[in-house]
Image (cartoon, rainbow, N blue to C red):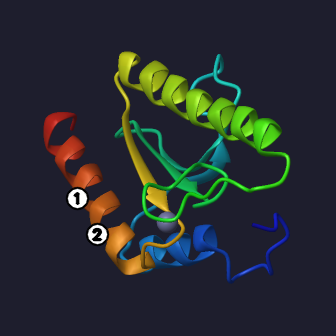
Amino acid sequence: MTKQRRAGTSPEMKLRRELHGRGLRFFVQRRPLPTLRSAADVIFPRSKVAVFVHGCFWHGCPEHGTMPKSNSDWWRAKLTANADRDARTVQALEMAGWAVVVVWEHESASWAADRVQEVVSTRREVDP
Ligand SMILES: [Zn+2]
């Protein structure tokens, strides 16, 4: 749950490398919409696909999300606020015509890249 990860080994970096290796071209750490406070980890502006890589703890992964025992009220408020913000972000993007792919840090980079690639290719068919 540390925010400091070694460059090149974080889930974001692994995913980026995987996507890049498949010939996909994208931007990193950009806000898909100017009105949005959060940046997406990877965005494909032309196909309007935004990818968020979520830490299992901070974003309350259904498989690994845990609630710390000490200071539990503070943590509950903090983690609930994160989840609310995530939901609002997805909603705002979808309303603006974007597709959102949420990747959990526990997912393998190649499996996550499969999902992203699938969404991007679908969007390209619709939106040449
Ligand atoms: Zn997880």
Q: Would you identify the image quadrant in which residue 111 lies?
A: bottom left
Q: Is mark 1 on a helix, strand or loop?
A: helix
The N terminus lies in quadrant: bottom right
5 with respect to 53 (left or right): right
Q: Which residue lies furthest to the front in this view?
A: 69
The image shows residue 66, relative to residue 113, as above or below, that is above
The image shows residue 111, relative to residue 91, as above or below, that is below
Name the residue: 15% across, 35% down.
Answer: 126
Name the residue: 43% across, 63% down.
Answer: 63
The image shows residue 16, relative to residue 81, as above or below, that is below
Query: In front: 75, or 41?
Result: 75
Query: In front: 46, or 54?
Result: 54
Mark 2 neighbour class, 10 Å CA radius: few under 14, some 14 to 19, many 20 or more: some
Query: In front: 117, or 61?
Result: 61
In this view of the protein, can residue 111 be seen by the observer?
Answer: yes
**Badge 2 amino acid:** Asp
Residue on which disc 2 sits: 114
Q: Which residue lies furthest to the left in this view?
A: 125
The C terminus lies in quadrant: top left
Name the residue: 21% across, 34% down.
Answer: 127
Residue on which disc 1 sits: 118
